[in-house]
Image (cartoon, rainbow, N blue to C red):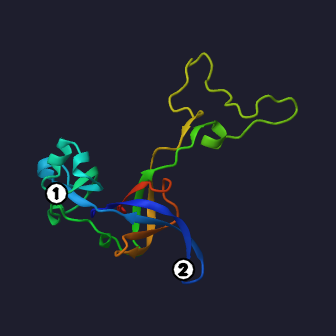
Amino acid sequence: MKAGLFAKKVGMTQIFDESGTILPVTICKTELCQVSQIKTKDTDGYNAVQVAYGEAKLENINKATLGHLKKVGNKGFKYFGEFHVTSPEEFKLGQVVKLDTFSVGEKVRVTGKSIGKGFQGNQKRHNFSRGPMTHGSKNHRLPGSIGAGSTPGRVYPGKKMAGQMGGGTVTLKNTEVLYINQEENILVLKGSVPGKKNTMLKIQAQKY
């Protein structure tokens, strides 16, 4: 495994491939990502690198975070993320993770916070079927029975019911990298990715 990076979702568009087929793509713009901590099996029990991202003014960062960032340099970051790696000795503190860690045609995993859709019913949230709309039926979009009667006399945990939909962490696997522009820090991914515009995405190599 190799270290990944964090990128901001710019939006979606479509491009044509060599055969003329239209492909939906998502455009992502990477920010400055620096290695802020190196973890090994000897010290932490596993091999990983911590990457700092989200630049901020030093006066807007608390003292604990500033102390943690002293080894990185005179730069402030608000957020941190980890990536499991196979060879942590290949990284150095303060090293900048760039787009060249990926290549065109590579499959990656993209993690982000999905769009929140608020409180939704069973039909929208879980694709339930509705009841009949005619012949005197009063069960149109009701949940129906939620238990088995006096035995067990309770609702089983995990019962699919109405509730908060979206707004959770979602990971997409096997997302293909179609285009990389290192000068503009642009990364183009095939298809859609979680979140709306300006959502921060965690992009890392696909596990094998």
Residue drawn 60% across and 15% down? 150
Viewer-nearest residue: 3 or 115: 115
The disc labelled 1 sits on which kind of residue? Asn
- Residue 206 lies, in percent from the top left, at 37, 63
* Residue 179 located left or right of residue 75: right
Q: At x 50% / y 54%, what residue is drawn? A: 196
Residue lying at 60% horizontally and 41% vertically, measured from the top left: 125
The answer to which quarter of the image holds residue 30 is bottom left
Q: Is residue 24 visible?
A: no
The local crowd at label 2, few if under 14, some if 14 to 19, many if 20 or more residues have their Cα within 10 Å, is few
Which residue occupies the extreme bottom position in the image? Answer: 18
Q: Quadrant of residue 121?
A: top right
Question: What element does badge 2 sit on?
Answer: loop
Where's residue 161, x and y in %?
59, 33
Tell me how far mark 1 sits from mark 2, CA to CA: 44 Å
Is residue 98 toward the left or the right of residue 28 in the image?
left
State whether residue 43 appears in this view: yes
Image depth: mark 1 or mark 2 in front:
1
Q: Nearer the viewer, residue 114 or 151?
A: 114
Looking at the picture, which amino acid does disc 2 mark?
Asp
Q: Quadrant of the N terminus?
A: bottom left
Q: Position of residue 128 (x, y in %)?
A: 66, 40
Dot 1 surroundings within 10 Å: few (below 14), some, or many (20 or more)? Answer: few
Above or below: residue 165 compared with residue 195: above
**Dots 1 and 2: beta carbons under 8 Å?**
no
Name the residue that disc number 1 marks. Answer: 74
Question: Is 80 located above or below residue 123 in the figure?
Answer: below
Q: Element type at marker 1?
A: loop
Q: Which residue is mark 2?
A: 17
Which numbered disc, 1 or 2, marks the residue that appears first in the sequence? 2
In the rendering, at what x and y percent does residue 53 appear?
Answer: 29, 56
